[in-house]
Amino acid sequence: MKQGDLLHSGKAKSVYRTDDPGVYIMKFRDDITAFDGEKKDTLCGKGVYNAEVSSFFFRYLEEHGIRTHYLESTEPGTMAVRALEMIPLEVIVRNIAAGSLVRKYPFREGEPLDPPVIIIDYKSDALHDPMLNDDLVFALHLATPEELDLIKATALAINEILREYLDARGITLVDFKLEFGRDNGDIVVGDEISMDSMRLWEKETGASLDKDVYRFSKGDVMETYAAAARRILSPSGGETA
Ligand code: C5P
């Protein structure tokens, strides 16, 4: 498969066409941003960790019956993905109150959310990703009621699968963001599932193992990403970083 023209460049990833119109190459760059792009840096090696973790989670979800865009890992920091018609929604599943939920609503940080809370934002840098509700999704023709039902059910199923997997490795899945696309009418998980898009707390210490370390300058970001990747990719549960 040959890498072709750049199709899209986001804040931390670039997507390239290939000689197969149904396949794209997703490159995880070393760029990291926070607070709507206000804080920006480049951290050498970050892209490789996020690509490894994303590729692993996509393969794991496929093994558990969830359709994703993942095809294969090509070289470090990249993955070959199915070309999807992306739906501009950011679907966030929250098990524990943290981040913007605590800033915007009267939750205490660390408060369990049972059942989990799904929040759906409109993916638009220009509009700063405003929160949607079902009526707005339909009024904006972003998804049909059937598609939205499937998106929510899939997000909750993924939450259960990842929560159990991470729990066995000493990690609490606090929240995470998913994006979805269409492949011949089917709803498929796209984008990434990595330390940039999840909030992960070490069970024993409560320490962050994710982008919060960068957002709030809580420590060495690359050491944190390396430790998170090592734990997530460890074959058996119970191993420490
Ligand atoms: O900032 P907030 O608390 O709303 O983020 C919730 C979760 O969604 C976090 O895990 C965060 O990393 C992820 N997220 C993301 N991309 C965004 C917004 C949030 O990956 N644009």
Image: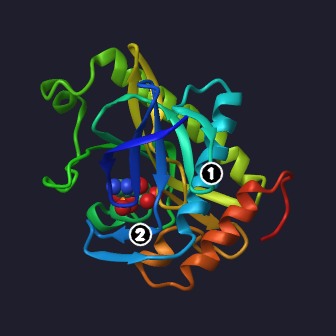
Which residue does the numbered mark 2 point to in the structure image?
Answer: 32
Residue depth check, mark 2 versus mark 1: number of the one nearer the observer: 1
The label number, if any, that marks residue 37 in the structure image: none
Ligand 1 contact, mark 2 (Cβ < 8 Å): no
The relative height of residue 208 versus residue 239 in the rendered view (above or below) is below
Q: Nearer the viewer, residue 97 or 129?
A: 129
As helix, strand or loop, the secondary structure at mark 1 comes to loop
| Image quadrant, ligand 1 | bottom left
| Position in image of residue 169 (x %, y %) | 77, 57
Q: Amino acid at mark 2?
A: Ile
Which residue does the numbered mark 1 point to in the structure image?
Answer: 75
The relative height of residue 190 versus residue 46 in the rendered view (above or below) is above
Q: Nearer the viewer, residue 83 or 127?
A: 83
Q: Is residue 46 left or right of residue 238?
A: left
Q: Amino acid at mark 1?
A: Glu
| Position in image of residue 68 (x %, y %) | 54, 31
**Residue 228, picture quadrant:** bottom right
At 56% from the left and 25% from the top, the residue drawn is 67
Q: Is residue 190 left or right of residue 174?
A: left
